[in-house]
Amino acid sequence: MKEIVVVSGKGGAGKSTITAGLSYFLKENDILVDADVDAPNLKILLEPELIREEDFYSGKQFKIEQDFCIMCGRCYQECSFEAIEIVNLNYVIDDVACEGCGLCQFLCPVNAISVSDKLTGKKYVSKTKYGFNMVHALLNPSEENSGKLVAEIKKIAKNLAKEQNSSTIIVDGPPGIGCSTISAISGSDILLLVAESTISGLHDMERLIELTKNFKVKRKGFINKFGLNHSIDEKLVNLFESKEIEIVGYLTYSQNIPQYLKKRVNLPEHIDGYKKLFEGLYNRLMEAVG
């Protein structure tokens, strides 16, 4: 079983478009993972049908029990995050502002503050229109621990892959170089680094290459929107070559692509030229991973 992770240095670089194109060539018993848990969008192109869902809990949620609160105001005065407010003459904890440090509970003289596990998102297993399963998740707005959620859905995917005797897992990683990206990369066999031919795309790819060099994993390069800026194209090619990262594909800039995506068209599904491009990319990645 081989794991391919598609990553980019920034959002909007075309990472999910490339991942969706690659997924077209997966077998029915293979697995796709959408690890962009803050803004998952593979479902737009792959139209998955939900099989099951699970709650994701992370961190602690504190609550002032009004029946026991004596209104001493100590928690209100000592909270460094100003997460305790006065609402209708009662002290209440703002879940968004609260950092879960637990100081309020420690200070309360009458034990009026309760604590519970915090529901921060959902994990899903769905079946795509192509027949293979997709594991994905959604973190609630303003919540943290996206790295932990990514690790959990990758574990679900690997267990499912073992059950189904899958040969391949493709992971659409989160954009950027944060904890969730590190979590997505960990344990993979090969990375496809998707660069966008823009100034910001070049800068963020430099940071991503620097991050990924610390992982013992094969790396391949891909340039999206190639031809949009010839100067940046040349700099991206030179960047990959200087880091000894083979470029395994290009997606030429076209104003038609956003129109296809608006219509929920997965590029290799209906367009012969793109089918050949993505099939070649898929085969090159599979050859590289061995």
Image (cartoon, helix red, strand yellow):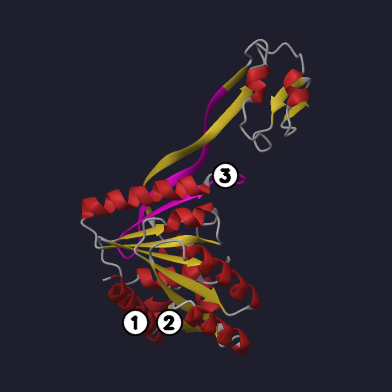
Q: In this image, 253 relative to 157: left or right?
A: right
Q: Residue at x 62, y 24 (%)?
A: 63
Q: In this image, 286 relative to 40: left or right?
A: left
Q: Amino acid at mark 1?
A: Gly
Q: Amino acid at mark 2?
A: Gly
Q: Look at mark 1 in the image and give the residue it sits on.
A: 280
Cβ–Cβ below 8 Å for labels 3 and 1? no
Q: Look at mark 3 in the image and give the residue it sits on.
A: 144
Mark 3 or 1, nearer chain start = 3
Give how far apart the Cα atoms at labels 3 and 1 are.
38 Å
> Where on the picture, by quarter, is residue 253?
bottom right
Q: Residue at x 44, y 39 (%)?
A: 55
Label 2 neighbour load within 10 Å: few <14, some 14-19, many 20+: many
Q: Residue at x 56, y 85 (%)?
A: 233
**Residue 123 visible to an observer of this rendering:** yes
Q: Which residues are magenta?
A: 115-142
Q: Look at mark 2 in the image and give the residue it sits on.
A: 249
Q: In this image, 241 relative to 142: left or right?
A: left
